[in-house]
């Protein structure tokens, strides 16, 4: 997977390519893999996606926009690094250590590309994490890919999904697309086609044609009520808004309708299997989960000496 980020300072825009395409592993489940997805072991990854940093306002960790001197220092350091001037990396490191997330992101790019410093994915990942911790939405997107691919450190699908969700909620369309992929595949999150459809729709509403294609491909697997509910939430989405409650399902179900059917067979739910997320349905889910916890506790107690 490939992503990119730009750095905007005093009208100067510099492209910062962070990750190169990782190698592909042999497919293990090509039959169930959705179309247009590259399967890498248990991970489903989209074709190259790009994130434009210029679309997002600088986070609080970056030099304040009103501080012209700080902005000029960052712009000058980046320009010097692009030209390979002596001392440019040290200047960037000083700004990065001071908490400038744009300097941290650019320093990460240098460690990935080996420009002015040795190639070091672990160091690139560390600086990306610093920028993500400061609240930079695109840094969260980049860090999610490091976790998803195990590049420069341990692989953690759950952490990757969490970071994609934070970045997606902040408005990064590529994180919205990738989060939808993870929900579709059940990677790092419980498989949930309703949530996948919602996030594909959010990305599609931002102009992503591939996301629109993927949303359409899920329509035959969702009920009209599931689609209308997801579409309503997608239409209401605004970057930075409080996220609505995630659609709840029981294990083994990928849609609300499937979950309703399973709960009905188990005696927890009496009602239509129409895919509508109602209070009655949620009560049934909670009752089922409570039952499962009780059974697990009983089994654990019985196994004790």
Image (tube, grey):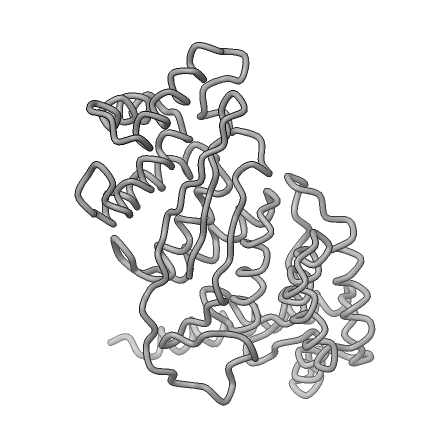
**Nearest the camera: 1 or 59?**
1
Q: How many marks?
A: 0
User: From the viewer's perspective, is residue 79 above or below residue 205?
Assistant: above
User: From the viewer's perspective, is residue 70 above or below residue 56?
Assistant: above
Residue 55 image point, x, y percent: 60, 38
> Residue at position x 38%, y 74% from top?
40
Quarter occupied by the C terminus? bottom left
> Residue at position x 45%, y 17% from top?
71
Residue 163 image point, x, y percent: 47, 50
Residue 24 visible in the picture: yes
Relative to 204, 96 lies left or right: left
Residue 173 image point, x, y percent: 60, 51
Residue 61 image point, x, y percent: 44, 26
Quarter occupied by the N terminus? bottom left
Residue 286 visible in the picture: no
Q: Residue furthest left?
A: 118
- Residue 15 is drawn in which quadrant? top left
Q: Residue furthest front?
A: 83
Relative to 1, 111 lies left or right: left
User: From the viewer's perspective, is residue 286 above or below residue 34?
Assistant: above
> Residue at position x 45%, y 74% from top?
38
**Nearest the camera: 189 or 72?**
72
User: From the viewer's perspective, is residue 165 above or below residue 298?
Assistant: above
> Residue at position x 37%, y 20% from top?
76
């Amino acid at each position: 997977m490939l992503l990119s980020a730009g750095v905007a300072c005093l009208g100067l825009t510099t492209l910062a390519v962070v990750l190169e395409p990782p190698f592909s592993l042999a497919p293990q489940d090509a039959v169930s893999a959705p179309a247009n997805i590259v399967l890498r072991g248990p991970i489903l990854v989209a074709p190259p996606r790009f994130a434009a940093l210029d679309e997002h306002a600088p986070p609080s960790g970056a030099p304040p926009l009103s501080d012209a001197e700080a902005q000029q220092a960052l712009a000058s350091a980046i320009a010097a690094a692009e030209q390979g001037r002596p001392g440019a990396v040290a200047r960037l490191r000083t700004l990065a250590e001071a908490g400038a997330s744009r300097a941290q992101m650019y320093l990460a790019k240098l460690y990935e590309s080996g420009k002015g410093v040795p190639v070091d994915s672990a160091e690139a990942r560390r600086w990306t994490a610093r920028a993500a911790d400061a609240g930079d939405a695109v840094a969260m997107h980049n860090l999610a890919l490091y976790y998803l691919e195990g590049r420069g450190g341990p692989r953690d699908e759950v952490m990757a999904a969490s970071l994609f969700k934070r970045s997606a909620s902040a408005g990064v369309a590529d994180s919205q697309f990738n989060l939808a992929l993870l929900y579709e595949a059940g990677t790092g999150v419980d498989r949930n086609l309703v949530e996948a459809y919602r996030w594909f729709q959010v990305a599609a509403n931002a102009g992503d044609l591939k996301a629109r294609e993927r949303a359409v491909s899920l329509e035959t697997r969702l009920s009209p009520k599931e689609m209308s509910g997801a579409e309503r939430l997608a239409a209401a989405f605004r970057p930075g808004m409080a996220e609505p409650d995630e659609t709840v399902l029981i294990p083994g179900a990928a849609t609300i309708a499937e979950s309703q059917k399973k709960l009905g067979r188990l005696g927890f739910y009496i009602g239509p299997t129409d895919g509508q997320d109602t209070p009655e349905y949620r009560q049934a889910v909670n009752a089922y989960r409570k039952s499962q916890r009780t059974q697990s506790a009983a089994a654990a107690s019985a196994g004790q000496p």
